[in-house]
Image (cartoon, rainbow, N blue to C red):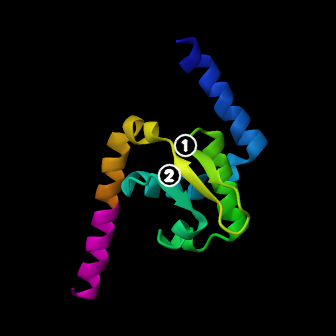
Amino acid sequence: QFLHSYIMRHSLAFYATTIGVSQDQDQICEVAGYILAKRLEDISMRTLGRGSRTMRRLTREEGARIFEQLEAFGWLEQINKRSDAPSWKVNPEVHTLFAAKADEERFRRNEARAAILDMLGE
């Protein structure tokens, strides 16, 4: 109870103010949703190019900042620190803890894809 009612709220407040999560919240949610929807086991800067329009627009620096924040939240662990091709391993617990959210995200993405195809007449 103490962990969930006190520590978690204060941790989130710390991350939001110190790391600046609020500035990047939409992009973080987009990348996190992509991780869940695609059941990714690892992710890299190159992966951003395969994601949504929002993800493709991220600069290398913005992508690195988002990955660092997801790492701070326990979602990722950097496995390749080479500056030309950094990559991160996705914490497998993410897929377990957020299984319902992953299903919602896959559904949302499929609905959006179907709506676009319908508009194009395909």
Dot 1 amino acid type? Trp
- Relative to 16, does residue 85 appear above or below in the rendering? below
Dot 2: what SS?
A: helix
Q: Residue furthest top?
A: 1
Dot 2 amino acid type? Ala
Q: Position of residue 27 (x, y in %)?
A: 58, 59
Q: Residue at x 71, y 61 (%)?
A: 82
| Residue for badge 2 | 32
Q: Position of residue 10 (x, y in %)?
A: 68, 26
- Relative to 94, does residue 111 appear above or below in the rendering? below
Q: Which residues are magenta?
A: 109-122
- Relative to 20, does residue 97 appear above or below in the rendering? above
Q: Residue at x 45, y 54 (%)?
A: 35
Does residue 96 appear left or right of residue 54 in this picture?
left
Does residue 93 appear left or right of residue 18 in this picture?
left
Q: Residue at x 53, y 52 (%)?
A: 29
